Image (cartoon, grey):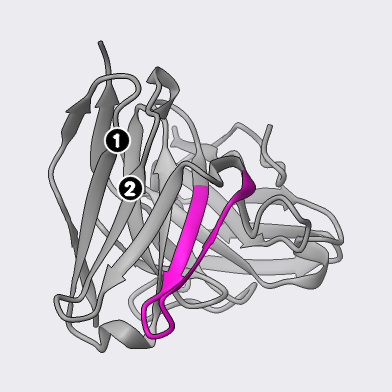
Amino acid sequence: QSVLTQPPSVSAAPGQKVTISCSGSSSNIGNNYVSWYQQLPGTAPKLLIYDNNKRPSGIPDRFSGSKSGTSATLGITGLQTGDEADYYCGTWDSSLSVNWVFGGGTKLTVL
Amino acid sequence: QVQLVQSGAEVKKPGSSVKVSCKASGGTFSSYAISWVRQAPGQGLEWMGRIIPILGIANYAQKFQGRVTITADKSTSTAYMELSSLRSEDTAVYYCASWKSRWFDPWGQGTLVTVSS
């Protein structure tokens, strides 16, 4: 059971838009920055979004992030078949048991 | 831009230990922290701990306290993660990643550790 809750899967057609939610609490998302990672099949995760809504160099502006209260959202527009991957949110958690937490991951299927 | 290269796959017996390395090139090794994250087959990401090489201070997720040791050798720009008392549930891909305090970037290529009798 992940501390951050993501939908197990989402799907959309090429060219369409999709959003992936990440729900937490005041001990994590509510008081900390969120980052998002893309994991293509058989590869290591890759940073997509940091500090809630910033894109690293090289990440297309089709990818966007936002945060409101204790939830965060990753948006992907102009879907491409190459976007098929698992997506994870992550943030610092100020509870005693862990320091950093990830969501359970969302598998994106581009139909 | 720093690059992280990890050691190769390992097969271990239950009850034994494994030590995975993560060598950094580019950038200044001591100026950033290294975290370890694992991913069991078909599962999500799980943070294990981190080390700040310049300080030599490591922090661990409570779940792994007492079983994991993260160290760093500044002379070779290499971080290590040692996990002891291995059990089948520890079978996973172990990743190192450069920790920028609020995000991880970049990541190593991953090391598969298989625990099997």
Residue at image point 60% right, 39% down: A104
Residues under labels 2 and 1: Cα distance? 7 Å
Location of residue B40 (image quadrant): top left
**Residue B55 located within the stretch drawn in magenta:** yes
* Label 2 CA crowd tier, 10 Å (few <14, some 14–19, many 20+): some
Label 2: state its secondary structure.
strand
| Amino acid type, residue under disc 2 in the picture | Glu
**Magenta stretch: helix, strand or loop mostly:** strand
Q: Is residue A70 left or right of residue A16?
A: right
Q: Which mark is residue B82?
A: 2
Residue at image point 72% right, 44% down: A3
Q: Which mark is residue B112?
A: none
Q: Which is more toward the observer, B114 or B12?
A: B12
Q: Is residue A8 above or below residue A93?
A: above
Residue at the disc numbered 1: B17
Residue at image point 40% right, 22% down: B87
Quadrant position of the C terminus of chain B in the picture: top left
Q: Is residue B110 above or below residue B112?
A: below
Q: Which residues are magenta?
A: B47-62
| Amino acid type, residue under disc 1 in the picture | Ser
Quadrant position of the N terminus of chain B in the picture: bottom left
- The chain letter for the residue carrying disc 1 is B
- Residue B54 location (% of width, % of height): 38, 85
- Residue A99 location (% of width, % of height): 64, 60
* Label 1 CA crowd tier, 10 Å (few <14, some 14–19, many 20+): some
Q: Which is more toward the observer, A21 or A30?
A: A30
Q: Are marks 2 and 1 in contact (CB under 8 Å)?
A: yes
Label count reads: 2
Q: Is residue B46 above or below residue A46?
A: above
* Residue, far top: B117
